[in-house]
Image: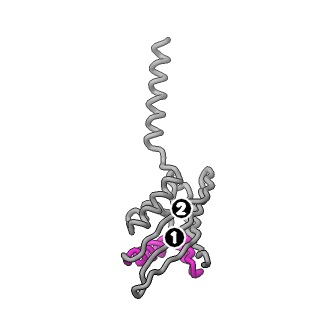
Amino acid sequence: MARGITISSFVVLLLAASVAATAAPSASLVLQQHIEAIKARDMAGIEATITAQDSLQLILPNGKRTATRAEYLAFHEEFFASSSWSMRFEPVFESVGKDLAVFTVHSYYSDVEDGKPVTGESWLTFVFKLEQRRWRLVSDQNTRIPR
């Protein structure tokens, strides 16, 4: 009998270890991966953190809205083509539920245009949804903070 309990306990431990090894990264970790991909101009890194579905909302500081994954990727490909800008990010809010996570991030943007420094700050709101056991970005809104 004691041997049966030991074998059962061993099987339970193996199953628990297997589940832990295949568990999805936390929403906060995926946010960090997304931010690092932006800073590194890493398209593959961006693709790894966004929805696999067609619908993906992006709202830019000028009010322009795109609604598809393809448009999101096209915007970032164009944005990443410039090597003169840099960004810094400070997460300020998070709310993570069972299958939806919302993050607000304070971003600081620096660039050089016509030889002159350009800076700006924005509030970024990222919404991630749990898709097939992985957190994926489904909405990205950028609101410029007036000077």
Residue depicted at 44% across the width and 43% down the height: 22
Residue 136: x and y, percent? 51, 59
SS assignment at label 1: strand
Question: Dot 1, crowdedness within 10 Å: few (<14), some or many (≥20)?
Answer: some
Indicate the quadrant containing the C terminus: top left, top right, bottom left or bottom right. Answer: bottom right
Residue depicted at 59% across the width and 80% down the height: 63
Residue 36: x and y, percent? 43, 61
Q: CA distance from mark 1 to mark 2?
A: 9 Å
**The quadrant where residue 86 appears:** bottom left
Residue 138 marker: none
Seen from the viewer's position, the closer of residues 108 and 30 is 108
Label 1 amino acid? Tyr
As drawn, 10 above or below 88: above
Seen from the viewer's position, the closer of residues 119 and 34 is 119
As drawn, 98 above or below 46: above
Seen from the viewer's position, the closer of residues 50 and 84 is 84
N-term-proximal mark, 1 vs 2: 2
Residue 78: x and y, percent? 41, 78
SS assignment at label 2: strand
As drawn, 69 above or below 11: below
> How many labels were placed on the picture?
2
Residue depicted at 57% across the width and 82% down the height: 62
Residue 90 marker: 2
Seen from the viewer's position, the closer of residues 12 and 97 is 97
Q: Are marks 1 and 2 in contact (CB under 8 Å)?
A: yes
Q: Residue 21 in magenta? A: no
Label 2 amino acid? Glu
Q: Residue 63 in magenta? A: yes
Q: How is the image coloured?
A: one colour
Pointer 1 residue: 108
Q: Which residues are magenta?
A: 56-82
